[in-house]
Amino acid sequence: MVCDRCKMAVGMVLTAAGLHPLSIELGEVSVEEDVSPDRLGLLRESLGRLGFELLGDRRQQIVDAVKSALIRLVRYGDNRSRQTVSSYLSSELHQDYSALSRLFSEEEGKTIERYYIELRIERVKELIGYGELTLTQIALQMNYSSTAYLSSQFKSVTGMTPSQFRAAKGSVRKSLDKV
């Protein structure tokens, strides 16, 4: 879950299943009741229809925590700070970055760095789509060293330049939780 609407949707599913949520946070839910295996299956199905996944596996929970932290960094964080992704994740998740990186790569089939690049490019697509900022302003906001580097990375990820993307009216965007 990466937004308040996500939390609200999960809360509605839990309530519809007759459960009483105590807290709904990003990636974690607490309910008053013990949940039977049958009810757990129904929750898994209901949440799946909304694009959510019910997690039980600790490894997958850690991967999702990494994804959520990076989405928050890209979406709401101060991307102008000079903090590295590795130090950011280590401080956010209170775990050694090399262990997080190894686990993420094993579970997702790509590195944390690659995932972070893909998230940044999706955010750049969003900002281009709004049409309010120049590419130079977007590069600065997203902490790229130059507009040329942003353009190069954008093309390597999407196969098109930012100008081509703008001309296509942003028709190829993904939501950040789908990256």
Image: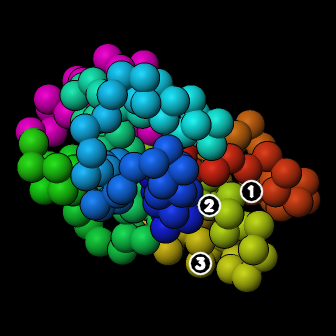
Quick check: marks 1 and 2 in contact, CB under 8 Å? yes
The residue positioned 49% from the left and 44% from the top of the image is 17
Tell me how the rendering is colored.
rainbow
Residue 133: x %, y % from top left = 68, 80
Residue behind mark 2: 124
Span shown in magenta: 96-115
Q: Is residue 151 left or right of residue 79?
A: right
Q: Which mark is residue 152?
A: none
In front: mark 1 or mark 2? 2
Residue 31 in view, yes or no: yes
Q: Residue at image x 26%, y 67%? A: 82
Q: Amino acid at mark 3?
A: Gln
Of 140 and 129, the residue lying toward us: 129
Q: Is residue 17 magenta?
A: no
Q: Mark 1 is on which residue type? A: Pro
Q: Position of residue 141 (x, y in %)?
A: 50, 74
Check disc 2 and give the amino acid type.
Val
Name the residue tied to disc 1. Answer: 162
Q: CA distance from mark 3 to mark 1?
A: 13 Å
- Which residue: 79% across, 46% down? 172
Q: The residue tagged with tag 3: helix, strand or loop?
A: helix
**Residue 48 sits above or below residue 125 on the image:** above
| Mark 2, secondary structure of its residue | helix
